[in-house]
Amino acid sequence: MLGSSGSYASALNACSGYLVRTEQASVLLECGPGTIGPLQREIDLSEITAVILTHCHPDHWLELPVLRNVFKYFAPRSGIPVYGTAVTRQMNDAVTAAGSPHGEPFDWHTIDAASVVSVADQTWTFSRTDHPVETLATRTDCGGLSVGYTSDTGPNWKISELGRDLDLVVCDASHLSAFEDHGIPHLSAREAGERAREAEARRLVVTHLVPGSDPEAHRAEAEAAYGDAVEVALPGARFAV
């Protein structure tokens, strides 16, 4: 967990960023503001195999132009696959200075809910969530094990859209159930637990908590709905499957 703050960074927690590591690949899932620093505590940046971005909201991708600086001017690389929605690419292009003689490090690929992406030993599939912009939940499969990530979603989408029996689900739980009727396009901790239980997920981690939230309150509410232990995606946490 490189960063898991919802919508904006807290004093000690960057925006969304997750490192998905297997024997053959190190994939950066989301690249929210502030994630490059924690990423360097886990791997050398040269080890990044690919980047996957779920939607165009800046708290999920806006560190990417900074990562581009690394590979363009300081540790030159080319052909690094970046997978993201069409609008995410458009927004990236709008803030990225073009025309440099140094070449471009990233090889962009537009994805949608029907895409299937292979990154070494990892297979990624997607599902469009309930969010104001095109947003893709992800499922990663490797060696018979699976991890689901909801990205941002409101209540009109279910984790089971990624398939049942996920070994680990990292789920949006931005607020508590007291705010469920406020029209917030995110899940509450209760809804996260309920949907993980319905999907028969074997393990649940809640993420994207708004800064100032009480992690223990989110954990307790999610556990009550899930019916089993729930963990919180605190920065630096590691979850193995």
Image: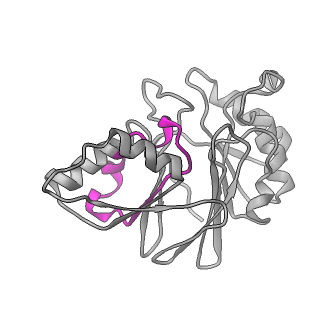
Residue 86 visible here: yes
- Left-right relation of 187 to 44: right
The x, y position of residue 194, in whole percent, is: 84, 45
Is residue 17 or residue 21 the one in the foreground? 17
Tell me the magenta residue range: 39-64
Q: Quadrant of residue 162?
A: bottom right
Residue under the point 79% across and 51% down: 196
The x, y position of residue 17, in whole percent, is: 47, 46
Residue extending furthest front?
A: 99
Is residue 94 or residue 167 the one in the foreground? 94
The x, y position of residue 160, in whole percent, is: 80, 58
Image position of 152 with respect to 120: above or below: above
Q: Is residue 62 magenta?
A: yes
Q: Quadrant of residue 127?
A: bottom right
- Left-right relation of 193 to 53: right
Residue 201 visible here: no
Residue under the point 84% across and 38% down: 224
